[in-house]
Image (cartoon, rainbow, N blue to C red):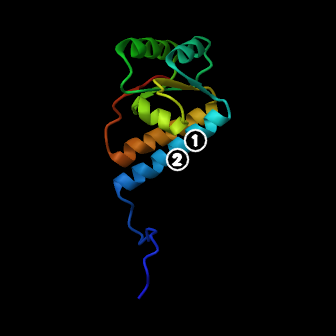
Amino acid sequence: MARPSGRAVSNGAPASPSSAADSVLRQFAQLLGLARRARKLVLGVTAVENELRRERVKLVLLALDASYGQKKGVVGLCRKTGTPIYERFRKEQIAAWLGCGKVTALGVQDAGFAKSLKRLLERVDGASSSSPSGVHPSRT
């Protein structure tokens, strides 16, 4: 009798939505880490707002548990500059991915990273079959 290897065996059936979402989130976290090592991320509300004013940010990720004042400032600047903004995750989850303290807002300064992260966020929405709540649509 064959021993279980501990790895999932693909039988051609599609993966469950939760495992697909987990896989996409893992890719998202890895890409965020790569962007941080490449020094293409701006961390913190104040730094993100400053870079938005200079129009150096291509995408903003805002924590769900950010305060009203923090959200108001960042969302307003994103609308003014036409920068896409996503509210998806809690401060602790973003911080865990980046290996630092709580992160309320982060800005992506590289267009290539921003495009890839945006694509992964859209896949998370599709994999979890939830509505894209927390998305503030704006021009890309």
- Farthest residue in the right direction? 38
Q: In this view, does 102 lie above or below 5?
A: above
User: On the image, numbered disc 2 is attached to which residue?
Assistant: 27
Callouts 2 and 1 close, C-beta under 8 Å: yes
Across and down, in percent, residue 65 comes to: 36, 25
In the image, taking residue 65 as reference, residue 76 lies left or right, namely right
- Farthest residue in the left direction? 130
Q: Which of 78 and 72 is in front in this view?
A: 72
User: On the image, numbered disc 1 is attached to which residue?
Assistant: 31
Residue located 59% across and 22% down the image: 57
| Kind of residue at disc 2 | Gln
- Count the numbered circles shown: 2
- Graded by Cα atoms within 10 Å as few (under 14), some (14 to 19) or many (20 or more), the crowding at tag 1 reads some
State the image quarter where residue 104 is shown: top left
Residue located 62% across and 40% down the image: 34
Q: Disc 2 versus disc 1: distance between alpha carbons?
A: 6 Å
Q: Nearer the viewer, residue 67 or 136?
A: 67
Across and down, in percent, residue 4 comes to: 43, 77
| Kind of residue at disc 1 | Leu
Label 2, secondary structure: give it: helix
